[in-house]
Image (cartoon, grey):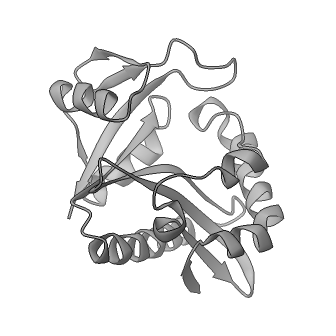
Amino acid sequence: MKISVLNKKLMLKHLDEILKIEKDTSDLRGIAYGIPWIKDNFLIERDMKWELSTVAFEKGYVAGFIITSCYEGDKAHVHRVAVTTSLPSYEKKRILRSLYLKLDNEANKKEIIYRTTSVPIDNISTQKFNLQEGWIEMNKNEVEDFIRQKNLELVVTDSNVMLDKFALNGDPNKFKVFKYLY
């Protein structure tokens, strides 16, 4: 397996493969993943996106990806994560760990202090994986700060649950927020 930074050139070259993994993941996971991103979602410019996103290749084909950007100058946010759906669970975890290791190496070079992610409330398997991998659930004050820092139109409903009142039909509207310290 080869892990690379997913720069814009690689994104454009492998966009069809990435879109297929995205669609397959959405089809398999449903509301626990949400509506599949389209080409424009993947190509939108975000701070340090092309330096922090990662991609895994197996036998020359995309096996998984993580889309990440920077906010507040020293924090990274993981926007999207997916791996080939046809693989067994242990293979998916192996790929995810490798993708995150590459992300962490790049984040350390950029002096990022931690990474965050929001996981749909129905996506129990990803929540469990994150906790096993050292992520911690943010508390209510941290979630409120996260919403403010990212200028999101969300509200905190429980100690660690964000509600998106404007979520599209088919997209999750409640999320748990996690943080991984470097």
The quarter in which the N terminus is drawn is bottom right
Image coordinates of residue 79 in percent, x first then y, are 50, 47
Please say if 33 is above or below 82: above
Residue 135 relative to residue 175: left or right: left
Q: Examine the rendered structure and indicate whether residue 136 appears above or below residue 32.
A: below
x and y percent of residue 51 in the render?
Answer: 48, 70
Q: Position of residue 101 (x, y in %)?
A: 38, 75
Residue 115: percent from left, percent from top: 31, 54
Which residue is painted at 27% across and 52% down in the image?
A: 135
Q: Residue furthest right?
A: 16
Within the image, what quadrant is residue 151 found in? top left
The count of marks equals 0
Residue at 73 percent of width and 88 percent of height? 59
Relative horizontal placement of residue 149, taking residue 97 as reference (left or right): left
Quadrant for the C terminus, please: bottom left
Task: In this rendered view, identify the residue nearer to me: 31 or 138.
Answer: 138
Side (left or right) of 19 relative to 96: right
Locate residue 133: give its quadrant.
bottom left
Which residue: 49% across, 30% down?
122
Q: Nearer the viewer, residue 161 or 124?
A: 161
Looking at the image, residue 133 lies above or below residue 51: above
